[in-house]
Image (spheres, rainbow, N blue to C red):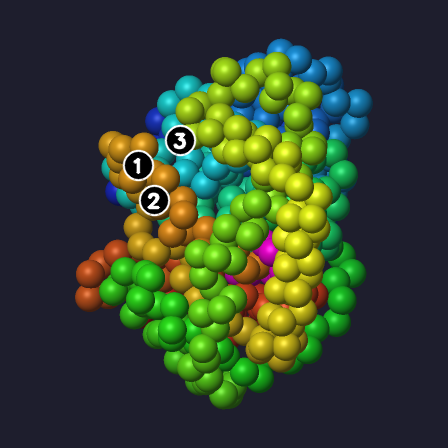
Amino acid sequence: MTTGEPRTNRRVGVTDDAQVHCWVPDSVRLAATGSGPLDGVTLAVKDMFAVAGRVSSFGHPAWRATHEPARATAPAVARLLAAGASAAGLAKLDQLAYSIIGNAGEGTPPVNSLYPDRFTCGSSSGPAAAVAAGLVAASLGTDTGGSVRAPAAACGLFGLRPTHGLISAEGVLPLAPSYDTAGVMTRDLGLLGRVLGVLAPAPPAGVPIRRVLLPADVLAGASVQTAEAVRAVAVALGAAVGAELDQSELGVFISSEVADLFSRLQAREVWATHAAWLGQHRDVLAADVRDRADRAERLSADPAGRQLADRRAGLEYRAALDRAAPPDAVVVLPVMPGLPPLRTASPDELAQFRLSALKFTAPASLAGRPELVIPVRHQASGLGLGVGLLGAAGQDPELLRVAGRLGRGSGPMPV
């Protein structure tokens, strides 16, 4: 199904938008402005992409109340509409897109149709909820530290964080510009490819993938089911493309230390971008988002030498990963350690989830690399999970091509 017509989700019985809680209060529909490869496709658009005449919420009514309407629609949205797509609505997100949980937006958190008792993850919570419930065929979100990949994995979707800069960020509210990307979620891999083709019509020529890297040394940080799913996808991918399967030692690239380096660099950019607004409105934020804003301010006051050392470490990380995982290699890794957090989880449990998930999402963010999430069904347990395919910069079309060789263009891959 690629038209995005509403369907009944058998898991939660949702048939309308209200039961999914995915749209912002002042959501609007956007009609197609042209015809093309996306004719008949309906979208959800994260409410941080500019729409002419509207004020984006950025996940909080205080932002909407303190900013002026956009003068023009974001090019990414305009491209999709010109290609024949329409938008069913503007979707919720976590406040300032500064969360990976899916619990800190406006009103009731969006419903995860795959796991109704668990969060969708975030910050692209509304876009993921809309696709998972069958209200739309595709969604346009953003990913800075995992905000497309985590919701895709949590809700059983294909999701792409593209190479940094591949898709225009013009007209998209920034969080940490050095790491912000637009991203796409769908239930259908072919549709994801068509959407990417519209958003990035002339991607660089990719290098054929000949090596599959399995970071076996980091799988202990994931649940048994997730580790088994990652291994199964790596084996299947190697067989499908005739690639060598290399059980690599990549723990130096996928670690809590790398995640903390990324979060420090991200936090300083968040403060540099939004210090003035945060200084006046920090008290209205959710507690966990406010805590991150406080940390961002503290880190921004670090001595210049310490900040420079972190920036150099980030560049060295990217260069080292380029050597360990060159363009002809794909790294198969967890997206999250296990299932998304329960809607009843305590603040401490949510904080622990964020830290453990960021270990797996930080590599693509820090290195500006594309990562494609593949939905899988762990047959022994029946769990729906997500597995990440991490490629080299510019390898976005090649990631989609090799994923297609797994033989599951729609729905979860059984493992």
Q: Are marks 2 and 1 in contact (CB under 8 Å)?
A: yes
Q: Which of marks 2 and 3 is nearer the N terminus?
A: 3
The residue type indicated by label 3 comes to Asn
Name the residue furthest left. Answer: 380
**Residue corresponding to mark 3:** 103
Q: What stretch is highlighted in magenta?
A: 365-372
- In the rendered image, residue 292, in percent from the top left (x then y), is placed at 50, 33
Q: Is residue 225 left or right of residue 99?
A: left
Question: The residue tagged with tag 3: helix, strand or loop?
Answer: loop
**Residue corresponding to mark 1:** 348
Judge whether 126 appears above or below 243 on screen: above
Judge whether 388 appears above or below 279 on screen: below
Viewport quadrant of the C terminus: bottom left
The residue type indicated by label 1 comes to Asp
Do we see residue 45 in this rendering? no
Q: In this view, does 129 lie to the left or right of 164?
A: left
Do we see residue 44 in this rendering? yes
Front one among 120 and 27: 120
Between tags 2 and 3, which lies in front? 2
**Number of residue marks:** 3
**Residue corresponding to mark 2:** 352
Sort mark 1 into few (<14), some (14-19) or many (20+) by Cα contacts within 10 Å: few
Front one among 178 and 74: 178
